[in-house]
Amino acid sequence: MTSAELLCDAFGVDGRVRECALRAERRCAGFAYEPQRHVATAMLRAFLDEGVAESDLAGSTGYGYDDAARARYESLLARVFGAERALARLSLVSGTHAIVAALAACVPPGGTLLSISGRPYDTLRNAICDAPHSLVRRGIEYREIALHDGAVDREALREELAARRVDTVFVQRSRGYAPRPSLDVAEIERAVQTVRASAPDVPVLVDNCYGELVEAREPTHAGADLVMGSLIKNLGGSLAPAGGYVAGRAAVVDRVASYLYAPGLGAGLGPTLGFGRSLVQGLFLAPGIVERCLRGLDFAAALFEELGYAVDPSPGAARTDIVQAIRLGSRDRLVCFATGLQEAMPLNARFRPEPGAVPGYVDPVIMSSGAFVAGATIELSCDAPLREPYEVYLQGGLTSEHAQLGALFAARAITAKV
């Protein structure tokens, strides 16, 4: 009996959803996850080259001077990213926090920040442009170049760099929660090369959220000066309790550390508070969890495609993040999807999600989550801004079976309504 058959029988999923699920599972059976083999091998190499000892994991409190767990973890991250340095701290509370801190550190007062991946997702653009004390309101000029046919418009980028001063170039790798494609590392590499040819001293910073360990290479392997993200997404392996990171060229990482803490102190402090073991073990497990997540998302994409909905990426397509867009076409279907998905959660399955205001979002958002680490989107969840074209963004899944069950419950809730 296949996994889909077992889940359908165990949870009473029948009719059209069951038929589509069995077809979806057959479609996914032959999918290969070749990049994950390379990622897993690279992670093993990083750990063996680092030589982590059990005594390194004890951590510290207070100022965190000479915290061995922090030093080992950051060294491991630098190896994974092919970077000179990494800064990973529990005090960075989200990916957005890490990104905005890095941008603020790298764009001088009166300087210019250029986004070459179009409009960032709501919470980040709010922090850059619209919120009180945003970067723009503190004197930074901000400009955008829209994506062209799903890629960086390199001709427009060359023209912009030639015509005006730019202090920092920003790239958002993932689609976030918007109807736009994610950018793969090869596309980011082409953009970096364009910047280097026109303005070699301008740093390129990449929002790496949702993308870590999905491809065989990271943006830092492709020349990016800095990547930023969250430790409770891909890298956390479901064990990291909190935190964010930046990694890249040592000089740029040092600028961020001085901004976050204090000039002269930089990266020399920051306790791990006994969580060093969870951070290091979570990183070790992360490649396998990311692969299981991708398998679950492929099933969800195939299931909803069988049901007649547009999905992006398509089942089996190369992925560069852990976000699956499903275009449901109506507000009611978004609510049904989130409600059905919630019923599959290991925590709070009996809760009912309701649309509401979320800090940083212009439109009401409905979310579904029941994570062991609050907000950890490597665990199964969804977000859906209630606006055209009414797409839901499914993400994560610690096991492919759980992702399958969530997709089945969401599909059942929608088909029961329409």
Image (cartoon, rainbow, N blue to C red):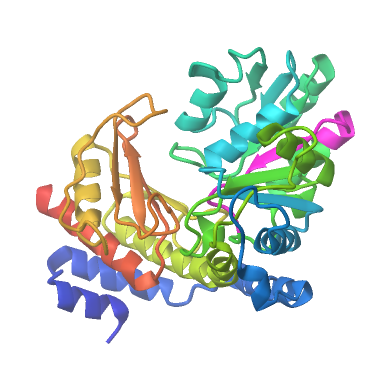
At a point 42% along the width and 63% down the height, the residue shown is 298
Vertical placement of residue 250 versus 156, above or below: below
Which quadrant of the structure image shows residue 356? top left
Vertical placement of residue 83 versus 114, above or below: below
| 365 on left or right of 339 | right
Classify the position of the N terminus by image quarter: bottom left
Which quadrant of the structure image shows residue 25? bottom left
Query: In x, y percent, where is residue 263?
Result: 77, 32
Range drawn in magenta: 195-212
Query: In x, y percent, where is residue 97?
Result: 55, 37
At a point 55% along the width and 19% down the height, the residue shown is 134
| 327 on left or right of 246 | left
| 367 on left or right of 311 | left
Vertical placement of residue 28 versus 328, above or below: below
Query: In x, y percent, where is residue 273?
Result: 55, 57
Q: Is residue 190 visible?
A: yes
| 405 on left or right of 124 | left
Front position in the image: 348 or 124: 348
At a point 11% along the width and 54% down the height, the residue shown is 416
At a point 21% along the width and 44% down the height, the residue shown is 353
Decide whether residue 268 is among the magenta residues.
no
